[in-house]
């Protein structure tokens, strides 16, 4: 008895019914597009926030505070930590420590005219050196002790009054935009920077929001964290800056994953039903052909495999088309509110190899599930009954 039907048989059968198979593949492509886009969205958000921080930097905030907005570090506490011997120093001998103040203001978006929250970050002079990924794109940096600010490239392009030479009013002052910086694929591109002392005066604040410093030896992080935890004068906690910002994406990333997977599951039911109908119709129209194959000596397992391969081809085509459509989303930048910080953040869709594998696996899974029962029906046909059909 013959056991294997040539793979070319399944390919030719798929092509002979390209209209109905194409429509089924299109339905699967839509599901794969939704599935891949949600994964890309989550990946883009997480990468943006993870890239914002450096593993060599330590972020110090009030114990229990989930964001810098909720945190408060007194001047005395900041001075104690700034004196730690574990901190790195620049070529000028100055400690690489930035005492920072973070507040939210509402700015008007250029395209919609609606207000949205934007993060204002007050920096110490060392703040620039702690973020080498940030470069000046236009104009100049603000001068300490003045009402000058610089805006992230995504803020400058998305909000009114945020370009070089324009003015923004907040904290009962007019602030002049003297520069625009490029922060790459990080969350800093969605911030406005100014002098920490001037911003604290404008908002009548006496405490900093956070303190960031670089370690001379990154392996000393645990020792520094234990030192802060053991000091009763410091009701603070330390995290690696990269870890701190990664945690800022958890709530939204989880929501996007749950929403996306739920939608993908619902849509996939329709796609699988479509595959079942298509394959059942294919089996019904090829009853005599199946009987002939059985009469020629091909086994039931071989017929099952042949029809399953045809169904997998439908899934594969749908997967490729869906992924191709989703890949176009990489050229778009999405701006939305981070639910943990309540500030606007801009990020891009990011397509990675694991996402490609998951999306393609999802498409093939729909093809396998949708084609299994029709393929089983074809394999179990009686030879005589099949030859008499039609």
Image (spheres, rainbow, N blue to C red):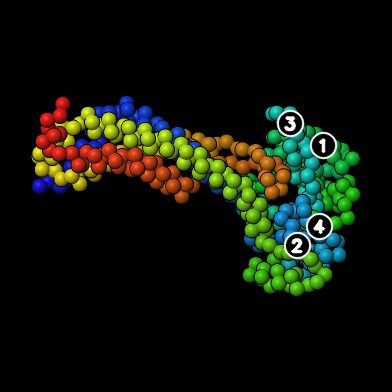
Among the 4 quarters of the image, the one containing residue 309: top left
Q: Position of residue 361 (x, y in %)?
A: 39, 46
Mark 3: secondary structure: loop
Q: Is tag 4's residue or tag 3's residue first in the polypeptide sequence? A: 4
Label 2's element?
Answer: loop
Residue with the mark numbered 4: 72
Q: CA distance from mark 1 to mark 2?
A: 33 Å
Mark 2 surroundings: few (<14), some (14-19) or many (≥20) residues within 10 A: some
Residue 263: mark: none
Return the residue at label 2.
Answer: 63
Mark number for residue 114?
3
Mark 4 crowdedness (10 Å alpha carbons): few <14, some 14-19, many ≥20: many
Residue 286 in picture, x, y percent from top left = 20, 31
Specify the label residue 168 is tagged with. 1
Q: Is residue 67 left or right of residue 390?
A: right
- Looking at the image, which residue is at 20% across and 46% down? 301
**Viewer can see residue 216:** no
Q: Which of pointers 3 and 1 indicates the residue nearer the eye?
A: 3
Which element type, helix, strand or loop, lies under badge 1?
A: strand
Q: Residue at x 71, y 64 (%)?
A: 238
Q: CA distance from mark 2 to mark 3?
A: 35 Å
Residues at discs 4 and 3 in contact (Cβ within 8 Å): no
């Amino acid at each position: 008895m013959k056991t294997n039907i040539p793979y070319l048989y399944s390919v030719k059968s798929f092509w002979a019914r390209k209209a109905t198979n194409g429509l089924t593949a299109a339905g699967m492509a839509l599901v794969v597009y939704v599935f891949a886009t949600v994964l890309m969205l989550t990946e883009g958000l997480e990468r943006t926030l993870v890239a914002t921080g450096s593993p060599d930097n330590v972020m110090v905030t009030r114990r229990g505070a989930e964001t810098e907005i909720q945190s408060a570090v007194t001047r005395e506490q900041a001075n104690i930590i700034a004196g730690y011997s574990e901190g790195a120093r620049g070529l000028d001998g100055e400690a690489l420590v930035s005492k920072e103040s973070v507040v939210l203001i509402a700015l008007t978006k250029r395209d919609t005219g609606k207000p949205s929250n934007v993060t204002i970050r007050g920096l110490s002079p060392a703040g620039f050196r702690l973020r080498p990924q940030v470069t000046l794109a236009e104009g100049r940096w603000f001068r300490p002790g003045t009402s000058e600010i610089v805006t992230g490239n995504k803020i400058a392009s998305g909000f009114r009054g945020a370009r070089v030479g324009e003015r923004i009013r907040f904290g009962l002052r007019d602030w002049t935009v003297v520069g625009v910086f490029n922060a790459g694929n990080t969350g800093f591109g969605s911030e406005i920077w100014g002098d920490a002392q001037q911003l604290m005066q404008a908002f009548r604040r006496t405490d900093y929001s956070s303190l960031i410093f670089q370690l001379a030896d990154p392996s000393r992080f645990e020792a520094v964290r234990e030192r802060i935890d053991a000091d009763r004068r410091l009701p603070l906690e330390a995290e690696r800056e990269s870890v701190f910002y990664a945690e800022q994406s958890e709530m939204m990333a989880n929501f996007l994953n749950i929403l996306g997977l739920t939608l993908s599951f619902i849509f996939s039911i329709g796609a699988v039903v479509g595959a079942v109908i298509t394959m059942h119709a294919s089996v019904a129209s090829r009853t005599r052909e199946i009987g002939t194959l059985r009469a020629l000596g091909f086994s039931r397992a071989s017929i099952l495999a042949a029809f399953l391969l045809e169904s997998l081809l439908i899934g594969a085509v749908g997967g490729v088309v869906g992924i191709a459509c989703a890949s176009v989303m990489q050229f778009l930048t999405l701006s939305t509110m981070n639910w943990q910080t309540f500030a606007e953040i801009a990020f891009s869709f990011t397509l990675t190899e694991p996402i490609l594998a998951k999306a393609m696996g999802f498409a093939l899974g729909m093809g396998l599930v949708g084609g299994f029962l029709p393929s089983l029906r074809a394999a179990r046909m009686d030879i005589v009954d099949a030859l008499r059909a039609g």
